[in-house]
Amino acid sequence: MKPKRPRPKLDQENMAFWTGGAEGRLNIVHCGDCGQYTHPPRVLCRHCQSENIAPKAAPGTGVIDTFTINYQPWAKDLEVPYVIARVALDGIPGVYLTTNIVNCAVEDVAFGDRVRVLFEEQDGIHYPLFERVA
């Protein structure tokens, strides 16, 4: 059994991000006025300050921009080592997700690896994790 991940506090701004995985959607806030994306979710577009924003499904693929391997068991039953990575999302310049890379050995992870999203559900939250793709 996997240890519980820290539960985010859900609110109107971030609900679509944390629950979109139920439908297989990686929802990122998109501005209907300037067309830019904002993450983390906010009530205003970070580019033009418009309130005309809504969650939009992102492609769910990207590239490992940077990463580290954690060897410290910060929580009870936490399996180490594991990868913490920053993923640059395809088609959404300037938006990065800090996440875990799963389903591979930590020593196999490299800068520039192509990745795709998958979701781990815990108590109604769908945590976006990523796995390497060939």
Image (tube, rainbow, N blue to C red):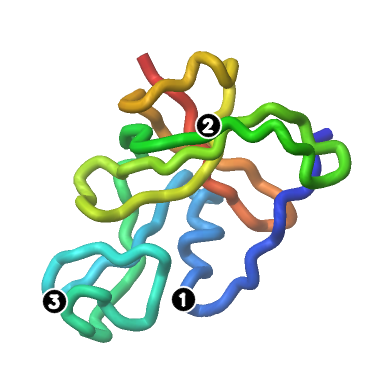
Name the residue tied to disc 3: 33
Say what secondary structure mark 2 lies in.
Answer: strand
Say what secondary structure mark 1 lies in.
Answer: loop
Q: Which residue is drawn at 42% across and 49% down?
A: 97
Q: Provide residue 98's location: percent of width, then percent of height.
A: 47, 48
On screen, residue 61 versus residue 120, left or right, reads left
The amino acid beneath tag 2 is Ile
Tag on residue 64? none
Quadrant (top left/top right/bottom left/bottom right) for the C terminus: top left
Q: Provide residue 77's location: percent of width, then percent of height.
A: 86, 37
The amino acid beneath tag 3 is Asp
Q: Which residue is drawn at 71% across and 57% down?
A: 6
Q: Quadrant of residue 119?
A: top right
For marks 2 and 1, give the CA distance.
25 Å
For marks 3 and 1, give the CA distance.
18 Å
Q: Which residue is drawn at 35% across and 24% down?
A: 113
In this view, the mark in front (2 or 3): 2
On screen, residue 121 versus residue 60, left or right, reads right
On screen, residue 10 versus residue 65, left or right, reads right
Name the residue tied to disc 2: 101
Tag on residue 13? 1
Say what secondary structure mark 3 lies in.
Answer: loop
Q: Provide residue 10's location: percent of width, then percent of height.
A: 60, 72
On screen, residue 107 versus residue 27, left or right, reads right
79 relative to 18, above or below: above
Q: Give the crowd class for mark 1: few <14, some 14-19, many >=20 residues within 10 Å.
A: some
